[in-house]
Amino acid sequence: MIDVDAIADVTYELARRDFSHQLGRPEVGFCEKPVWQTVRALGTRLWLDTGDIQATKALWCSEFEALTTNNTLLNKEIQKGLYDDFIRQATGAIKHVASDIDERQLILEIAFVLNAHHGLKLVERFDAHVSVELHTDLAHDVEGSVAYGKRYFDICPERFYVKVPLTPAGLLAARKLGRLGIPINLTLGFSARQNYLAALIAQPRFLNVFMGRLGAFVVDNGLGDGLNVGEKVTLATQRQLHRLRQAGRTRSLLIGASMREGSQVAALAGLDVFTMPLKVASQYENDPVEKVSSQVENDPPIELDEGADFDAAELWDVSQAFMDSVDELLKGDLNALTPQDIQRHLAQTGFGNLFPDWSEQDRRTVTADGKIPVFGKWKERLARGAVGLDALMNLSAFLSFATDQKALDDRIRSLA
């Protein structure tokens, strides 16, 4: 029988190898930048969406506080070959205490320790909070997500946020971890209603809207110019969270994620958090808005072509019927809920298109489409409300991350 505690001890030591950082003291001092001070003054916390240490050095300043990594960003770093020796050493150390470990579990452990080890390098260099993400194989495993989430937090409780995907199992895992005091970044959100549900059920520290992918879906499928689609959803979600926080019903903050242009910094000023790709931060820094002001109450118009035959309003509207459905779910014993209970309840109350039962063929189709679903393949189901666009985008984003996770796993396999 595998000694789980021994493996946890080994991976803890591997992750923290050579980590001697004094919290509150970055490796070098960083300057202040007035361009970002004006954004921070509006209440927006500034993160960078990257795991690239060298590229981050050129932009990092005192106004930034966190870095966000994910399966894709970590894979980019691993594929550079920088951690090949570390992978071999980790393999030997884990097999030394668990010689009978199977290949899948070994890869899961090494991927975990790589994520944690690289996260600590980011902490060490920038004294930043860092979001570290669960392996995609855990997305539908509540107890597995909780176990690995606790282990991430134990490695660096002062600086690590644990990223959990917005799935039925992810909601419950995030809730359990949060109740242990572990700060959760619940990722892969695409609508106000998804995040409304998550804010009340999971109560994570952070929620997300992947705004750039929403605009890309419209543009790539010839359904409109894509302008303001992601921004409209993000601002609507922010207002919903404001109301919930004011009512004392949640503490969750909103991250504007998947930002694509520097202009979005001013267009979304006042949002709780930005996580900006380096390109976006650089664009805004080089061409800032002189008199930036909060846009949280703004509700920008969008234009969709007639062929966009789906209920776009589901992305930004949270209907009273949906709120009632969530309230009904909250009346039960949340600690006894299963992922299937959440799906079943939503289906029974008319919102089964939020977490559909995806078939293996559906998953293959979405994976083949890449990061943005091909509208024509989903048009009929979207039109009749069998699938919500937020649900489809959630699945697409998750499977794109799973594809990159597989590439990372394959490199581990080739070296282990």
Image: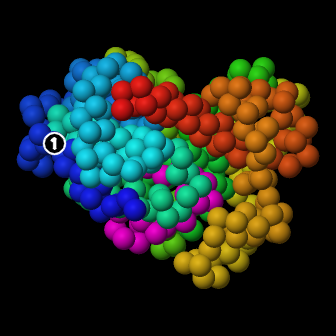
> Left or right: where does residue 384 sit relative to residue 139?
right
Check disc 1 and report the residue beneath it: 17
Residue at screen point 17% across, 34% down? 125
Span highlighted in magenta in the image: 163-182
Q: Amino acid at mark 1?
A: Arg
- Residue 91 lies in quadrant: top left
Residue 307 x %, y %:
88, 28
Find out whether residue 175 is within the magenta segment: yes
- At x 83% / y 69%, what residue is drawn? 348
The residue sitting at 26% across, 39% down in the picture is: 92
Which residue is nearer to you in this view: 64 or 153? 153
Whether residue 350 is visible to the viewer of this picture, yes or no, is: yes
Q: Could you say where residue 153 lies in the image, as x and y percent from the top left?
A: 30, 57
**The N terminus lies in quadrant:** bottom left
Predominant secondary structure in magenta?
helix
Q: Judge by depth and name the residue closer to the eye, 62 or 127.
A: 127
Tell whether 227 sits left or right of 271: right
